[in-house]
Structures are given as structure tokens and as C-alpha cells.
Image (spheres, rainbow, N blue to C red):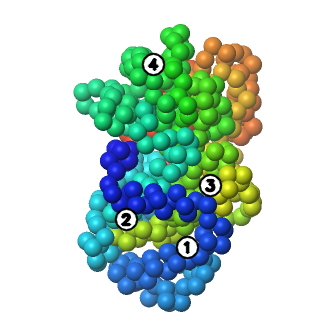
């Protein structure tokens, strides 16, 4: 993904012009645009996509009669498993016309989902993504540090002069390689950092331990993991610059970006986002407007959002604002008294000073292991706050074993899950 951003085809340039303007549309313009785009997509899907041909016939849905956004609710939500089981049923019979690029993504279980993106879906994704990056201060060609899962064979990091990007393989993140990379960072001085919050924090920690400073970028963009207030604050302190949160799906069904005013906007000129559920925590479902090769309609995304009501943002954009992305759907903790706790567990460590990162591994129903990476400010008081925070959520029957560690367990995707269940409470 990241590679393609720096290989801009002509189509992306054209779409960038569009996105530069559409970001300032009125709420009414956005709605009209969405109705028009959805109608076209629904007509195409009902005609050319086997899954939707059958489904629309079965539920009696007629795309010709689509006139308002609320009518999308007549179509059932689509879960990832349905696509994973039968990807070919979602492939349009005339997909060749729109371009067929196979891509894959792995969920938190590391099980890959294979899907197709059309040329237009790809161009739109890159153009919309670049606009989001620009909200965070990025300009094309700006010298960038990108920490991602690259699976480099022969090296831990490398600087590409053509694209002006220093790529660090997050799979190789360890003290030695981080310190080597920091030397290079301090020599070439990238102005923009991007990566998982966890990885950027670890690099900062290695630098601190070694008593060296990292030349600060102008801003940081994070994605791939929940950016808690705590992690944001730590990143801001270490790198002495603003931090922007960004969320996007490989499948292109949703995009959420933080603007200059610090608000998280649903990117509504790129995909149709639905917040499903009661006020408070909502489930997110998304529909990409452009993927005619493999349309996914009302595609459920395993992350919860905390909606924020009708917030008007001072940035001048009318895309809806949400308060928080409440975390990747991760494994969850089950307590002996029957509680089911997911990403909410991360608040357990909010008050424990000196905890850099933590991970909870459930070994048995009444036993968890809490692994923490701490800095020198971690003391007895932190420990007792940590225990208090956990007890509050886990109750008194759970045995808690604490471990101070150097490294947390990583998943094959390169992501570090906050919760790992070894008793079968795995997100699928
Ligand atoms: Zn804004």
C-alpha cells in the first residue's frame, strides 16, 4: 500500500483535484453525492454481481427505486466471513472492464482475506489517503520515515532516495536496529513519521535508554492500532510534535482521518459510513463508492466507534465527526463471573505511571498474564494503580500475574495485539 502512494499514476492526480474541492462541500452536497454514488453502485451490483443478484432478488430490493440513504438499511449487513468463504460471488461478471488487482489483508487472527480492487478504487484510495496525510502536514516528496511490516530479507531498514522515504521493517524492531536507524534519521532528518503507535514508541524508548535524542519530525501519523490518549501523549512528548490518527481499510470500505483541528472525520466523499447501534459505542459498516470489480455493500468493520453527536468542526469540513475509534476488534478477556472485556481493558492502565506498553494474555478462565514494558518512572505506586485498574474490570476471582518484559508478543501480521486469548476467545 505505502509503496503505491509514491508511484502516482495519472488517475491519482486527477482524483486529487476532485478531493481537494470535495472536502469543503456542504452537508447537503455530501448527501446528494452519496445517494448518486450508491445508486449507481447498487444498480451495477444488482445486475453484474452474483451475490447481489441473488440477494436483491431474495429480499425484493430494487435499486431503481433507491432515492435516499436510509433505504440502504433494507440490505443486510455483510460480514467478512461471508466474503472470505465465497470471494468469487462478489466478483462482478464484467470486472475485467474495471480492472482486477488482487489484494489481501489479515484480520487480528492472521487469517487473510483475499479481495479485488478496481483501478478506480485504487486511485481513489490513494488520492483520498494523500489528502488525509496532508491534513497531518504531509506534502508529496517530503522526507518520510515509515515504520511498517515490510519483510525485508537482507536489511532492517533502507532509505529510498527516489521516493524520499526511509523504510523501517517493524518485524525487525529491536534495540540494535532501532539505534542504527536513529543514526540515519538524525543524519537525513525526515520531516514526517508514520507507523503503528507501538513501533514508534518503542523506537523512542530505545533512544531514551541509549541517551540519544531523535531529530523530531514536524508531525506524526499513526494507524493500524488504536491510538489511545495515553499513547498519543507519549508520542507527543517523545517526538515533540503533533500526532494525527488515521484509519483505513485495505478493502477500501472506510476511512477516518484526523484534521488540523484534532477531530476525527469520516471520509464521506470516499465511502459511505454507517454507525450502527445506540448512542455511545457504534459498530461501523462501510461501502466503497468505486470498487465495481468487487462491491462490498454495508461491509462490517470490526472496530467500534464512539460517535460524538453533531459536532461542527472549525476546519470548515462537513464530514461527520466521531469521538474515538474504540479499537481493533481484538481477542477478549472472559472473567470467571462472566464478563466479556475487549478493548475497554486498555483503560486499566490509564493511571499507571511509567507503563510504556502492555499486553494481556489469558491462559485460563481465572488467570491472566499482564506483560508490561516500563520506563524508569514506574514505581510501587504505578504497580498498585495498575492492579487497581485491572481489578476494577476483572473482579476478585481472577489471578493476575505481572511480568516486566522487553518485548510483547507479536502477531504474524506484525501487529501487537493488546489482548491475546489462549482459551479460545479469539476474534474471527
Ligand atoms: Zn475538522
What residue lies at 44% left-to-right and 76% top-to-bottom?
A: 41
Which circle, 4 or 3, is nearer the viewer? 4
Residue 80 in picture, x, y percent from top left: 45, 62
Q: Residue 319 — which label? A: none
Q: Secondary structure at mark 2?
A: helix
C-alpha gap between disc 2 and disc 4: 39 Å
Q: Which residue is mark 4?
A: 186
Residue 380 in picture, x, y percent from top left: 72, 16
What residue lies at 52% left-to-right and 46% top-to-bottom?
A: 134
Q: Which residue is mark 2?
A: 120
Camera-nearest residue between 319 and 374: 319
Q: Secondary structure at mark 3?
A: strand
Q: Are dots 2 and 4 in contact, CB under 8 Å?
A: no
Q: Is mark 3 within 8 Å of ligand 1?
A: yes
Q: State which tag comes first along the sequence, 2 or 1.
A: 1
CA neighbours of label 3 inside 10 A, class few (<14), some (14 to 19), many (20+): many
Which circle, 3 or 1, is nearer the viewer? 1
Camera-nearest residue between 301 and 383: 301
Q: Are dots 1 and 4 in contact, CB under 8 Å?
A: no
C-alpha gap between disc 3 and disc 2: 23 Å
Question: In the rendered image of this protein, does residue 258 appear above or below residue 410?
Answer: below
Q: State which tag comes first along the sequence, 1 or 4.
A: 1
Camera-nearest residue between 363 and 85: 85
Q: Secondary structure at mark 1?
A: helix
Amino acid at each position: 500500500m505505502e509503496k503505491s502512494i509514491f508511484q502516482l499514476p495519472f488517475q491519482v492526480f486527477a482524483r486529487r483535484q476532485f478531493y481537494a474541492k470535495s472536502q469543503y462541500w456542504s452537508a447537503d452536497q455530501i448527501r446528494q453525492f452519496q445517494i448518486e454514488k450508491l445508486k449507481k453502485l447498487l444498480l451495477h451490483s444488482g445486475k453484474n454481481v452474483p451475490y447481489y443478484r441473488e440477494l436483491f432478488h431474495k429480499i425484493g430490493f430494487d435499486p431503481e427505486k433507491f432515492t435516499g440513504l436510509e433505504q440502504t438499511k433494507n440490505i443486510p449487513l455483510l460480514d467478512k466471513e461471508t466474503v472470505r468463504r465465497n470471494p468469487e460471488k462478489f466478483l462482478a461478471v464484467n470486472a475485467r472492464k474495471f480492472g482486477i488487482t488482487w489484494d489481501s489483508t489479515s484480520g487480528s487472527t492472521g487469517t487473510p482475506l483475499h479481495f479485488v480492487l478496481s483501478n478506480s478504487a485504487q486511485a481513489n484510495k490513494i488520492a483520498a489517503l494523500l489528502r488525509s496525510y496532508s491534513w497531518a502536514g504531509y506534502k508529496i516528496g517530503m522526507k518520510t520515515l515509515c515504520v511498517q511490516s515490510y519483510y525485508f530479507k537482507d536489511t532492517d531498514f533502507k532509505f529510498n532516495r527516489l521516493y524520499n522515504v526511509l523504510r523501517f521493517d517493524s518485524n525487525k524492531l529491536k534495540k540494535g536496529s532501532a539505534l542504527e536507524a536513529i543514526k540515519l534519521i538524525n543524519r537525513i532528518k525526515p520531516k514526517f513519521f508514520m507507523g503503528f503507535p507501538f513501533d514508534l514508541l518503542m523506537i523512542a524508548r530505545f533512544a531514551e535508554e541509549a541517551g540519544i535524542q531523535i531529530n523530531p519530525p514536524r508531525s506524526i501519523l499513526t494507524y493500524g492500532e488504536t491510538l489511545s490518549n495515553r499513547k498519543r501523549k507519549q508520542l507527543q512528548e517523545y517526538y515533540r510534535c503533533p500526532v494525527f490518527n488515521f484509519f483505513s481499510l485495505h478493502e477500501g470500505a472506510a476511512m477516518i482521518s484526523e484534521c488540523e483541528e484534532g477531530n476525527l472525520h469520516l471520509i464521506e466523499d470516499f465511502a459511505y459510513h454507517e454507525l450502527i447501534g445506540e448512542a455511545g459505542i457504534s459498530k461501523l459498516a462501510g461501502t466503497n463508492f468505486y470498487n465495481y470489480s468487487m462491491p462490498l455493500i454495508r461491509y462490517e468493520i470490526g472496530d467500534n466507534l464512539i460517535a460524538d453527536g453533531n459536532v461542527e468542526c472549525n476546519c470548515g469540513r462537513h464530514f461527520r465527526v466521531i469521538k474515538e475509534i474504540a479499537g481493533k476488534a481484538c481477542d477478549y478477556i472472559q472473567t470467571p463471573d462472566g464478563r466479556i472485556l475487549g478493548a475497554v481493558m486498555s483503560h486499566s492502565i490509564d493511571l499507571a505511571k511509567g507503563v510504556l506498553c502492555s499486553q494481556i494474555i489469558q491462559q485460563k478462565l481465572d488467570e491472566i498474564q499482564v506483560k508490561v514494558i516500563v520506563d524508569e518512572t514506574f514505581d510501587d505506586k504505578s504497580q498498585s494503580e495498575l492492579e487497581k485498574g485491572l481489578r476494577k474490570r476483572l473482579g476478585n476471582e481472577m489471578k493476575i500475574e505481572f511480568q516486566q518484559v522487553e518485548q510483547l508478543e507479536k502477531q504474524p501480521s506484525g501487529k501487537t495485539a493488546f489482548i491475546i486469548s489462549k482459551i479460545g476467545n479469539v476474534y474471527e
